[in-house]
């Protein structure tokens, strides 16, 4: 069951990130052409581009947790014994997980508040802003799920196999 959830989350993250960045570039490009070629700007294009890039970045960041592609400073992990490194990795991932869950929860509460206030987009045909702000609780929850997977992997992996090759070793 967790494998199916993982595949669904991965699929959602990839598609939203790819569609968001592609659509954002297309809308921005269209607006630039309209502005310079026809001297007429699309009023809604800037706001839509921002929202598309926002969704793309947040879901792309959530996807990076799956690929372990976020920047990590491993200088200390490389010099401490592997048992200590495993504990340090576990603590680091637990802190990250707690942070992601907290942001997801409070983002959800904020989305409910925006819904109650009835906030709407000015340029995008009265689009309810809770749809835009929903990116925070959803993407952070997906990121938290990915970090939970990493925590499970750390717990089930032997301490002597827990550290990957350093970046310098991978280049060589």
Image: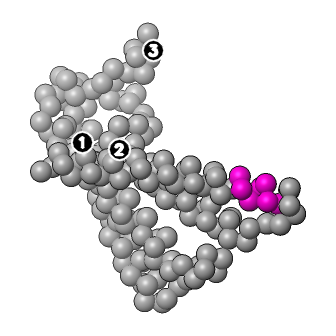
Residue 34 in the magenta stretch? The answer is yes
Q: Say if mark 2 contacts mark 1, CB within 8 Å.
A: yes
Give residue 89's quadrant in the image: top left
How many labels were placed on the picture? Answer: 3
Helix, strand or loop at mark 3: helix
Residue 65, label in figure: 2
Give residue 121's quadrant in the image: bottom right
Residue 141, label in figure: none
Helix, strand or loop at mark 1: helix
Closer to the camera in the image, 98 or 47: 47
First in residue order: circle 2 vs circle 1: 2
Is 81 left or right of 62, judged from the image as shown?
Answer: left
Q: Say if mark 2 contacts mark 3, CB within 8 Å.
A: no
What residue do we see at 74% from left, 59% from top? 31
What residue do we see at 36% from left, 78% from top? 109
Q: Residues within 10 Å of mark 2 (few under 14, many from 20)?
A: some
Residue 150, label in figure: 1
Q: In the rendered view, would you say 130 is above or below 171?
A: below
What are the residue bounds of the magenta stretch?
29-35
Q: Residues within 10 Å of mark 3 (few under 14, many from 20)?
A: few
What residue do we see at 60% from left, 80% from top? 125
Residue 171, label in figure: 3
- Between the residue at mark 3 and the residue at mark 1, the CA separation in whole angstroms equals 24 Å
Q: Say if mark 3 contacts mark 1, CB within 8 Å.
A: no
Closer to the camera in the image, 43 or 80: 43
Q: Which quadrant is home to the C terminus?
A: top left
């Amino acid at each position: 069951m967790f494998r199916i959830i993982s595949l669904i989350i991965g699929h959602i993250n990839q598609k939203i990130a790819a569609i968001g960045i592609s659509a954002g570039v297309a809308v921005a490009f269209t607006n630039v052409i309209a502005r310079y070629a026809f001297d007429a700007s699309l009023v809604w294009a800037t706001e839509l581009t921002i929202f598309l890039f926002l969704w793309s970045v947040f879901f792309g960041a959530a996807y990076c947790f799956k690929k372990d592609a976020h920047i990590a400073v491993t200088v200390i992990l490389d010099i401490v014994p592997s048992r200590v490194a495993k504990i340090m990795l576990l603590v680091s991932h637990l802190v990250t997980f707690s942070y992601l869950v907290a942001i997801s929860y409070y983002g959800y509460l904020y989305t409910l508040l925006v819904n109650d206030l009835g906030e709407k987009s000015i340029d995008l045909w009265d689009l309810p802003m809770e749809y835009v702000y929903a990116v925070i609780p959803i993407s952070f929850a997906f990121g938290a799920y990915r970090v939970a997977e990493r925590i499970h992997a750390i717990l089930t992996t032997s301490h002597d196999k827990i550290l990957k090759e350093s970046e310098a070793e991978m280049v060589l």
